[in-house]
Image (cartoon, grey):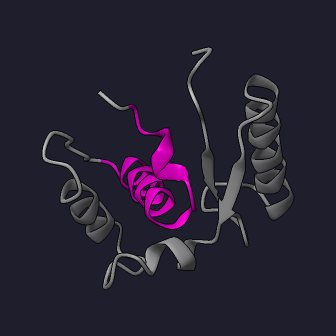
């Protein structure tokens, strides 16, 4: 881990998240996660991306969670995604690789 370079990409919360009691609780969780990541990896950048921004990289998926799963499964031949949360995480990660300057440098060279 010592030589590993890390860059975090997180979805920015804009409104009340389904299943959350209120917007304040959701934003508190977002801040807590960002704080934990910053403590564990102090030099790692954190990029916040809005849902519409990362979703625009995948035309036609919109808010349809099944389309998110299908799009994520099409990204890598050895990864099988079955849950919309996993799909969103993978789609956001690929958005980061494609849109954040220098992030491709973090890939290990074998």
Q: Nearer the viewer, residue 35 or 20?
A: 35
Q: Quadrant of residue 15?
A: bottom right
* Residue drawn at (77%, 45%) of the image: 29
Q: Residue 107: say if magenta.
A: yes
Q: Nearer the viewer, residue 16 or 99?
A: 99
User: How far across and down, in percent of the image, does residue 71 sit?
Assistant: 25, 65
Q: Quadrant of residue 6?
A: top right
**In the shown orientation, is residue 51 left or right of residue 109?**
right
Which is the main secondary structure of the residues drawn in magenta?
A: helix
* Residue drawn at (33%, 84%) of the image: 59
User: How far across and down, in percent of the image, does residue 25 sit?
Assistant: 82, 51
Q: Which residues are magenta?
A: 83-108
Going by the picture, which residue comes out furthest to the left? 77
Q: Nearer the viewer, residue 108 or 48?
A: 108
User: How far across and down, in percent of the image, does residue 13 sit?
Assistant: 71, 64
* Residue drawn at (40%, 59%) of the image: 91
- The number of discs equals 0
Query: Looking at the figure, which quarter contains the C terminus?
Result: top left
User: How far across and down, in percent of the image, does residue 45 sit?
Assistant: 72, 45
Q: Quadrant of residue 88?
A: bottom left
Q: Residue 27: say if magenta.
A: no
- Please tell me whether residue 96 is drawn above or below residue 5 in the rendered image: below
* Residue drawn at (71%, 38%) of the image: 44
Query: Looking at the figure, which quarter contains the N terminus?
Result: top right
Going by the picture, which residue comes out furthest to the top? 2
């Amino acid at each position: 881990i010592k030589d590993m370079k890390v860059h975090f990409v997180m979805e920015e919360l804009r409104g009340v998240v389904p299943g959350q009691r209120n917007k304040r609780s959701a934003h508190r969780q977002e801040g807590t996660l960002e704080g934990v990541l910053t403590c564990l990896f102090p030099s790692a950048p954190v990029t916040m991306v809005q849902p519409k921004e990362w979703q625009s990289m995948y035309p036609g998926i919109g808010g349809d969670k099944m389309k998110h799963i299908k799009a994520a499964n099409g990204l890598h031949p050895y990864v099988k995604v079955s849950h919309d949360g996993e799909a969103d995480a993978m789609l956001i990660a690929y958005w980061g690789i494609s849109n954040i300057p220098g992030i491709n440098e973090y890939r290990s060279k074998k």
